[in-house]
Amino acid sequence: MAYDKFTTLKSSAVPLPIENVDTDQIIPARFLKATERKGFGDNLFRDWRYNQDNSPKEDFALNNPKYSGKILVGGKNFGSGSSREHAAWAVYDYGFRCVVSSFFADIFRGNCLNIGVLPVQVSTEFLQKIFAAIEADPNTEFEVSLPEQKVTILTSGASESFDINDYKKGNMTNGFDDIDYLLNIKDGIQDFAKTRPF
């Protein structure tokens, strides 16, 4: 299994109300030397999280102890810039399983879906409701249901649906990456191959 199965996630959230967050801000280029998906979480938003002397910046959301959870809520156009898949690796390795925004860069969205991070795109209006709920109470919980394709603010009951490709939805539900999917249907592929002329 490539990663944990994703069905329904109930969690508080970390707010990052910044628009146009690009992949170099998510994981700076100097940390791209590794080829395994390990250790990248330590450097997620490195230049925003730490000063040059490696002391944490207290005003950054990920360093604020009042914020926690497996959901990251970002501003519009999250994950723009270069196509580095390490950005999605860093989000996953840090512990986030869902990123909510009003718009995602396509390549970042795809990279997230390939490794088990669910990108949930909502309307601008609903995103502002989420930010307002967190500001009112940082412990506010949200429910992200992949089967129902719906995100809910549990304190108010407000919810909104989101879209996801059926293939990726099935893979996330099973914890499959593309290779796992092919291995899962290996018998069917072999049976089909037997019907084809050489």
Image: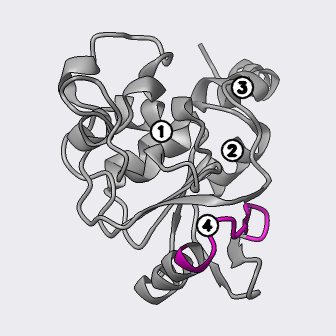
Quadrant for residue 17, please give it: bottom left
Quadrant for residue 171, please give it: top right
Rendered position, 110 above or below 67: above
User: x%, y% of residue 172?
Assistant: 69, 44
Q: Residues within 10 Å of mark 3 (few under 14, many from 20)?
A: few
Q: Nearer the viewer, mark 4 or mark 3?
A: 4
> In the image, what residue type sits under mark 1?
Val
- Residue 104 falls left or right of residue 54: right
Rendered position, 41 above or below 138: above
Colour scheme in use: one colour
Which residue is denoted by mark 2 in the rendering? Answer: 172
How many dots with numbers? 4
Q: Which mark is residue 138?
A: 4
**Label 4, label 3: how far apart the Cα atoms are:** 49 Å
Q: Residue 128: within the magenta?
A: no
**Label 4, label 2: how far apart the Cα atoms are:** 28 Å
**Label 3, label 2: how far apart the Cα atoms are:** 21 Å
**Label 4, label 1: how far apart the Cα atoms are:** 20 Å
User: x%, y% of residue 46?
Assistant: 30, 33
- Residue 78 falls left or right of residue 28: right
Q: Residue 146: within the magenta?
A: yes
